[in-house]
Image (cartoon, helix red, strand yellow):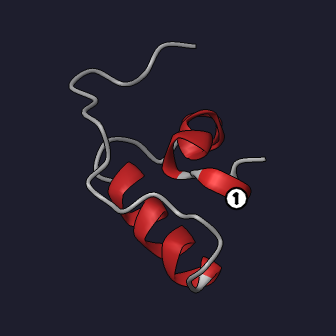
């Protein structure tokens, strides 16, 4: 599935598991919704918002 036209990398800090996960998800959803409200895109791109132990 291709990303929406005009897609750019998200402008949020990548989540590493040391801060509030709810805050990260809220920021993530807000950023993705600038481009699309497609849940498939939301799920496909989510791993790019993680790092370290949160990605494992």
Secondary structure under the numbered disc 1 in the rendered image = helix
Residue furthest to the front? 52
Q: Residue at x 58, y 46 (%)?
A: 46
Q: Residue at x 43, y 22 (%)?
A: 3
Vertical placement of 25 versus 48: above or below?
A: below
Residue 33 in sight: no
Vertical placement of 5 versus 51: above or below?
A: above
| Front-most of residues 12 and 36 | 12
Q: Position of residue 49 (x, y in %)?
A: 50, 50
Q: Is residue 28 left or right of residue 1?
A: left
Q: Is residue 42 left or right of residue 10?
A: right
Q: Residue at x 47, y 48 (%)?
A: 37
Residue furthest to the top? 2
Q: Is residue 53 left or right of residue 13?
A: right
Q: Position of residue 10 (x, y in %)?
A: 32, 47
Q: Position of residue 41 (x, y in %)?
A: 55, 35
| Front-most of residues 52 and 28 | 52
Q: Quadrant of residue 14?
A: bottom left
Q: Quadrant of residue 25?
A: bottom right
Q: Position of residue 39 (x, y in %)?
A: 62, 44
Q: Tell me the residue that label 1 is attached to.
A: 54
Number of residue marks = 1
How many neighbours does mark 1 have within 10 angstroms: few (below 14), some (14-19), or many (20 or more)?
some
Vertical placement of 42 versus 11: above or below?
A: above
| Front-most of residues 6 and 23 | 23
| Front-most of residues 56 and 27 | 56
Residue 13 in sight: yes
Q: Residue at x 36, y 25 (%)?
A: 4
Q: For the N terminus, which image quadrant? A: top right
């Amino acid at each position: 599935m291709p990303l929406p036209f005009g897609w750019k990398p998200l402008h949020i800090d990548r989540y590493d598991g040391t801060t509030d996960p709810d805050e990260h998800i809220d920021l993530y959803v807000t950023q993705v919704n600038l481009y699309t409200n497609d849940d498939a895109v939301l799920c496909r791109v989510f791993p790019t918002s993680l790092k370290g132990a949160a990605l494992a």
